[in-house]
Amino acid sequence: MTATTALLLSETDNVAVVLANITKGEDVPAAGLTAREAIPRGHKMAVTPIKPGDAVHKYGQVIGFASAHIAPGEHVHTHNVAIGESFERDYAFGERATPTEMVPEGERATFQGYVREDGKIGTRNYVGIVTSVNCSATAARLIVKEVEKRGILDDYPNVDGIVPIMHGAGCCIGTDDEAFRMLQRTIWGHARHPNFASVLMLGLGCEANQIPMMLEVMGQPSEETFHYTTLQAEGGTRKTVEECVAWFESILPRANAMTRETVPASELTVGLQCGGSDGYSGITANPALGIAVDTLVRHGGSGVLAETPEVYGAEHLLTGRAVSREVGEKLIERIRWWEGYAAQHNSHMNNNPTPGNKEGGLTTILEKSLGAVAKGGSTNLVGVYKYGEPITTKGFAFMDSPGYDPCSITGEVASGCNLVAFTTGRGSCYGNKPVPSMKLATNTPMYNHMAEDMDINCGTVVDGTESLEECGETIFRKMLSVASGELTKSEEIGVGDTEFVPWQTWAQM
């Protein structure tokens, strides 16, 4: 791909992506047209006449339907394109699934990770506090403050820090439905995450989300890696802080003694995310990340796509790659659930994209989804999982979640992702603890403007200085480096203490 003013992504498309701000009357040689109006970079220009009701095509796929006549050279966006009625998609379950050519075992990549007693591999070495209910959140924060005030961690340089996992839920909800099980999966997935050497779970004592009840279902870990108590059992806030600080002092020597070991890249599970997407997302960072994921899968590792509302309209591109009809139908069941969920709340699937997405050039959820699924590369879809459900397959998988980034990544981390790759066009400043989050910029101007938050510039692809394949290789190598301990930009800044956002679908009573 070389630097140009406009880009036609498929020969069947009737719109081109404008790669620089275009003024009215300006010639656009790449499209063989003159702009009839000003068009911002990242937005779309019609290259053929489009009649009202006609499908608008980008990526060789339908992204919406013309709501007015659109002449060649006109700006194509929300003022003249609508999502339209639901249209048939060929799900072709498993018809495009093909064997993945794996890298021979002796040639596979490695990284430096922490091997935990249960065999799971961590990319960081934190200790943590996980709250069962919001009523214990402030106490958790006070424990962290006390540890920091006393300088206890100063004596344990191999411990990356203490992370409080706090939230606003845990009580006055039903305890016998999927919504409650999802909350428990999410909390437990963090409490047992391999990026924690040890975790304290803290409750109030009378909440609906009882810790002993959770242990009955999930199992009791060893005292060296897990301890729980409640404010009511300890006799109040001050006594709880003292007892919990003492527990941390007792387990920190063991955590500090852990060192990184050479482990295969097959132990890397990467959560794939896009936020603050723009018109460049689907042509630079997302497909480049997809190439990196393909490479990771060939080395035995795993990539986990999420954000179900942001595959809406592009789900057929995933079902065709499913390893079985059952896997493909699991995804469609989730799509249908979301349609009903949106209707139940008098909402609409096209309420995503956001205002920022639209300002960046994305017109409908169909267009956003077609760019978003590119993060998943081209290998087979091997599994579809509920929110926070443990990922048990190797390869490319999907986890159901909202499109809201902190909530979606919370589920991916709970499912076992030990690294996050996050593409952004508008400039998301997301970070996560305990899991490092790499930020991949879709365009060079934003990367330069927000360089302190961005890890990789994928705008080089449209700048003509790097191919998609080269950019994908850069991302893959960065994955291995970050998994081995290289700090991401968000880690250098210290972002990630308050990004635990469980998905709440229950009736709050």
Image (cartoon, rainbow, N blue to C red):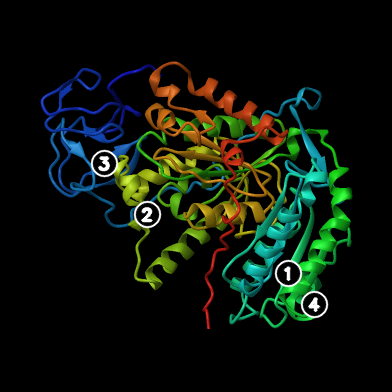
Whichever of callouts 4 and 1 sits on the residue coming sooner in the sequence is 1
Taking 76 as reference, is 208 above or below it?
Answer: below
- Residue indicated by mark 1: 202
Real-space CA distance between mark 3 and mark 2, rounded to the nearest whole angstrom: 18 Å
- Residue indicated by mark 4: 234
The answer to whether marks 4 and 3 mark residues whose Cβ atoms lie closer than 8 Å is: no
SS at mark 3 in the image: strand
Real-space CA distance between mark 2 and mark 1, rounded to the nearest whole angstrom: 36 Å
- Residue indicated by mark 3: 56
Residue 106 placement, left or right of 271? right
SS at mark 4 in the image: helix
Q: Kindly tell me whether residue 389 is visible in this rendering.
A: no
- The nearer-to-camera label among 4 and 3 is 4
Residue 276 placement, left or right of 306? left
SS at mark 2 in the image: loop
Query: Which numbered disc covers residue 352?
Result: 2
- The nearer-to-camera label among 4 and 2 is 4
Whichever of callouts 2 and 1 sits on the residue coming sooner in the sequence is 1
Taking the spot 35% from the left edge, 52% from the top edge, the residue there is 354
